[in-house]
Image (spheres, rainbow, N blue to C red):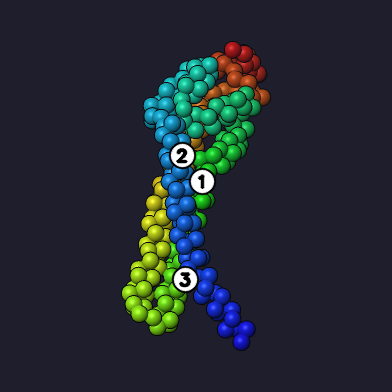
Amino acid sequence: MNSNVLMQKLVFVAPVIARIILYLLMGLSVLSIGIIIERWWYFRKRKDDLDALSEELRRMLAAGDLGAVRKLLKASPSVEAEILTEALAWYDSGPEAVEQILVKATRLRRKKFESGLLFLGTLGNNAPFIGLFGTVLGIVTAFRELGGNQMGAMGNVMSGIAEALLATAIGILVAIPAVVFYNMFQKKGSEIEEHAAALGNVLIASMKGSPRVNGVKRDAREVEHPGRTVEMEA
């Protein structure tokens, strides 16, 4: 008896829940579009010619002009330039310290360029199931109409099933752009990490190619004396 009462209550609230699910999917789609636009603008603002930046960086480091390197990185809007600027502050500590800072700076900025991706990925994976749940509830409602055995019941059933299938269609429609842009933005994040590592390698290679004593750059010229070598400071 209690199970029958429970079933009747579930059948009664099914249309209300199905309609709530439709509104929920529409709200999630608007939020998804907002995040997609925001992420697109974030990456668009930070776009730069990294090949040219790398070439200029290599040339300035070869000349030993760290001031020009800092100006070059400051003028670049890219995330990679921010990461390299932070690492460059540890230049006098040696290549090992710079390498550690490159890793740390990249990890800290990963939270920024991956912002919103968790929502897009979760929505892309689950929106079809939310829509399917709404479809099931809609079909339950349609068969309840059929069970009432009223005039025109079949028309109500067909209309209810059509509305129920609409929930699944909306769920899929919400999921597709979320998945597409999730993959796109995740790829852009991976590219930022790869480009930052490549620029960092240019800096570290330049440091390892320069004579250094206790982290301080020295002149390569040495004056030799019998039995010992004296290195002159620049």
Q: Return the mark for residue 167.
A: none
Could you tell me the amino acid type at mark 3?
Answer: Leu
- At which x and y percent is residue 103? 57, 39
| Marks 2,1: beta carbons within 8 A | yes
Residue corresponding to mark 3: 137
Residue corresponding to mark 1: 116
- At which x and y percent is residue 130? 47, 63
Q: Is 154 on the left or on the right of 199, as rendered? A: left
Mark closest to the chain's N terminus, 2 or 1: 2
Task: Name the mark nearer the viewer: 3 or 2.
Answer: 3
What is the CA distance from the residue labelled 2 to the residue labelled 1? Answer: 9 Å
Q: Give the residue drawn at x 56%, y 75%.
A: 9
Q: Give the residue drawn at x 50%, y 70%.
A: 14
Determine the image quadrant of residue 49.
top left
Could you tell me the amino acid type at mark 2?
Answer: Glu
Mark closest to the chain's N terminus, 3 or 2: 2
Mark closest to the chain's N terminus, 1 or 3: 1
Residue corresponding to mark 2: 38
Between 141 and 80, the residue placed more toward the observer is 141
| Residue at the bottom extreme of this rendering | 1
What is the CA distance from the residue labelled 3 to the residue labelled 2? Answer: 35 Å
Q: Is 14 on the left or on the right of 149, as rendered? A: right
